Every structure is written in structure tokens, then in C-alpha cells.
Amino acid sequence: MSVSPADDGLWCRRFDPAPDAAHRLVCFPHAGGSASYYLPVATALSPRVDVVAVQYPGRQDRRNEPLIDDIGTLADQVHEVLRGWDDRPLTFFGHSMGALVAFEVARRFEREDSGPVRLFASGRRAPSRYRDENVHRRDDDGIIAEIKSMSGTDDRLLGDEELIRMILPALRGDYRAVETYRCDPGATVGCPVTALVGDSDPKTSIDEAGDWKKHTTADFDLRVLPGGHFYLNSRAAEVLKVLDEHFTARAALRDS
């Protein structure tokens, strides 16, 4: 399915536009997440970096649109949209489910001899590392228990029945997409990859994160930070520092 440029505003959110920036960071949300999760990143990096956060269908202002519960299909559509945003070097950052989407979008770009200059894969096992998980088959209480255990959702929201009903379809669809995803063990991207992981993440071990090195033909870097699956909520400064190091290096390369 092709996405027209007129639909870009549905998919791509710029909370603090930086039209004169030399770099563009594309951020991919986690399961059940939305583009607004990356608003603080856009604020912190602007005007040096133009931050674009992807808004998947089925949540917030797109909640009445059909969900996409397949990583490949979602990557196809995001790739089509991002073709219109590659007027400057792209860097991808994806957390959890977003890391898989970012990886698959990068692969699609590279088939056209394009793609990001680096992929940051956060809080997610390497694409070839599988666990037998079935959260998407649980009842509503089971899904709520799962997201509470990840400490990535405000408990006040989880106590609001109306809001829970609004987010549960997206959560279930996203978990289905992640848990049914299968990747060829030999699948790679040609850009460097930085994997980030919390040292006590129950969903991704340090070893599983380290296997992202098998999915790039370029340089690989592993960053381990204190915390669980949503380590980046409390370690935002450290994550922003990692990103800043990347963009500083890119600027130096450009000016050399």
C-alpha cells in the first residue's frame, strides 16, 4: 500500500521543527506507544537536529484507523512515508517494538541504495533472538498486568477504565506484531548499529541485545544503562548524550 505525501502529517510528527538542521532523527515508538513519547527528545535536540516521531495507526488521534498488526506491513508503509523525509541524512532510533520497525524500514531503504546513517536499537532483542511469548493472546487483565510489569505506563492511566479501553486494541495489535515477527538470521543492514539496553530488562538480556552485531555489516556498539525495560524514562540524559555523540561525530565528518 502506498502512502501519499498528503498523509505524511498522520505518520510523521515534528514537535519542535528544525528546518535548518543538518541532521534528521526518526523515532519509532514501543508497543502501545505513540509519537508523543519522543516530544522531550525533539525539544532537547532542536534546532541542531530535526526530530520526526512516527505515529502508528490505531492510537491517539489515529485510534479510529485500522491497526497494523504485522511488522513487515507496518515497515512497508513507514518506508513509503519516509521517502519524502530523506532530504538530509537520516538516523533511526527505535525502542522495543520500534527497534524492529526501524530495522525493517532501514532494510527497505537499503534495497534502494539509501537508508539511515545509523540505527539505534533500544530495549529489544536482536531480530534473530526469539522467545516464545503470547501476550497478545491473553485477556485484557493479562495485557494490563504485562504493561504494569514493564513500568512504562502511568499507573493513573491504568486505573482509568475508559482510557484502558482506548489503548488496549493498539496494545494487543502491537504485541501480536512483535510476537509473530520472524527474521532471517542472516538479515543485515549496512549502516552502523548501536544497541542500548537496561541492565535489568526482563524482556531483553545484555547477551540478546549484543546479538544486534550479527545484523549489521558495519560497526556495532553496545551501551548498557541502569534500569529495566523502560530504562530510558529515568536515564534520558544518558540516552541524549549517546545521540549527541553521534550527531557531533557526523558534523565533524561533514566538515572535515
Image (cartoon, rainbow, N blue to C red):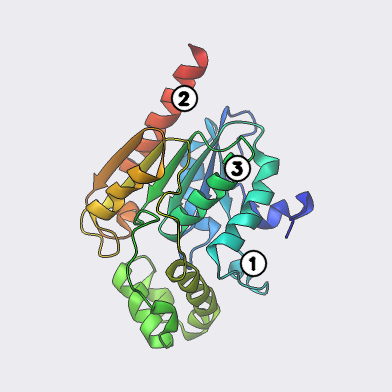
**Residue 198 appears left or right of 28:** left
Where's the N terminus, which quadrant?
Answer: bottom right
Say whether disc 2 or disc 3 marks the residue closer to the N-terminus. Answer: 3
Q: CA distance from mark 1 to mark 3?
A: 28 Å
Which residue corresponds to mark 3? 109
Look at discs 1 and 3 and give the one toward the viewer.
3
Position of residue 138 measured from the top left corner of the image (x, y, whole percent): 40, 85
Identify the amino acid type marked 2: Arg
> Element at badge 2?
helix
- Image height check: is 109 above or below 97? above
- Image height check: is 32 above or below 247? below
Identify the amino acid type marked 3: Phe
Position of residue 12 measured from the top left corner of the image (x, y, whole percent): 63, 51
Q: How many marks?
A: 3
Location of residue 3 (image quadrant): bottom right
Which residue corresponds to mark 2? 250
Look at discs 2 and 3 and give the one toward the viewer.
3
Position of residue 14 measured from the top left corner of the image (x, y, whole percent): 61, 46
- Binning the other alpha carbons within 10 Å of mark 3 as few (below 14), some (14 to 19) or many (20 upward) gives some
The answer to whether the residues at label 1 and label 3 have Cβ atoms under 8 Å apart is no
Say whether disc 2 or disc 1 marks the residue closer to the N-terminus. Answer: 1
Say whether disc 1 or disc 3 marks the residue closer to the N-terminus. Answer: 1
Residue 25 seen: yes
Q: CA distance from mark 2 to mark 1?
A: 35 Å
Which residue corresponds to mark 1? 61
